[in-house]
Image (cartoon, helix red, strand yellow):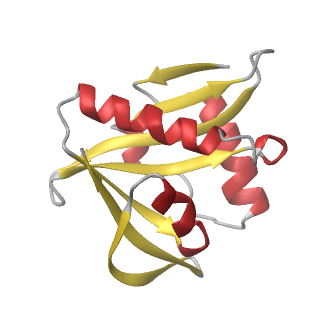
Amino acid sequence: MRISVYESLPNDSKEIRKAVFINEQGFQNEFDEIDNEAAHIVMYDKDEVPVATCRVFWDSIMNAYVLGRLAVIEEYRGKNIGSIMLKEAETYVQKKGGKTLILHAQCRAVDFYKKSGFIEFGNVEDDEGCPHIWMKKFF
């Protein structure tokens, strides 16, 4: 496995997000202006096939780095790749001097994030018909 960080949205990240969030989960508003300012992390398998992605950006309103759009293509799930991507995002944030990482988790994924030390805050909110909740982790 190889992981790369890009300062602009790469096609590999776009394709993973389309497959997972649009085709599989039915979201329509997948891409936004944040993609232009975020760092994009992509994991590749041994054959250089892109298998996972996420984005990280500074949010001045929340005064924290935000992790978003974490996606692992279906055939690679259950192989600890999501956890590896979380660690990579945490490392990125810490190298930038960040002390907190927050994310807006799909409620069905809350337990996954809790296993990595994230805690819930705020209320459950609807995002295109899918319940989400804010979570945070301090370093």
**Extreme-right residue of the structure:** 75
In front of the other: 8 or 20: 20
Residue 1 against residue 58 in the figure, above or below: above
The C terminus sits in image quarter? top left
Residue 122 against residue 135 in the figure, above or below: below
Residue 130 against residue 53 in the figure, above or below: below
- In the visual, does 13 lie left or right of 117? right
Q: Residue at x 17, y 31 (%)?
A: 97
Q: Position of residue 118 (x, y in %)?
A: 38, 59
- Let me know if residue 9 appears in the view: no
Q: Residue at x 39, y 55 (%)?
A: 117
Q: Position of residue 98 (x, y in %)?
A: 20, 38
- Let me know if residue 136 appears in the view: yes
Q: Residue at x 54, y 74 (%)?
A: 107
In front of the other: 129 or 70: 70
- In the visual, does 23 lie left or right of 18? right
In front of the other: 52 or 23: 52
Q: Residue at x 74, y 40 (%)?
A: 79
- In the visual, does 28 lie left or right of 139? right
Residue 35: quadrant of the picture: top left
The N terminus sits in image quarter? top right
Q: Position of residue 83 (x, y in %)?
A: 56, 43
Residue 34 against residue 133 in the figure, above or below: above
Q: Position of residue 122 (x, y in %)?
A: 30, 79
Picture mark count? 0
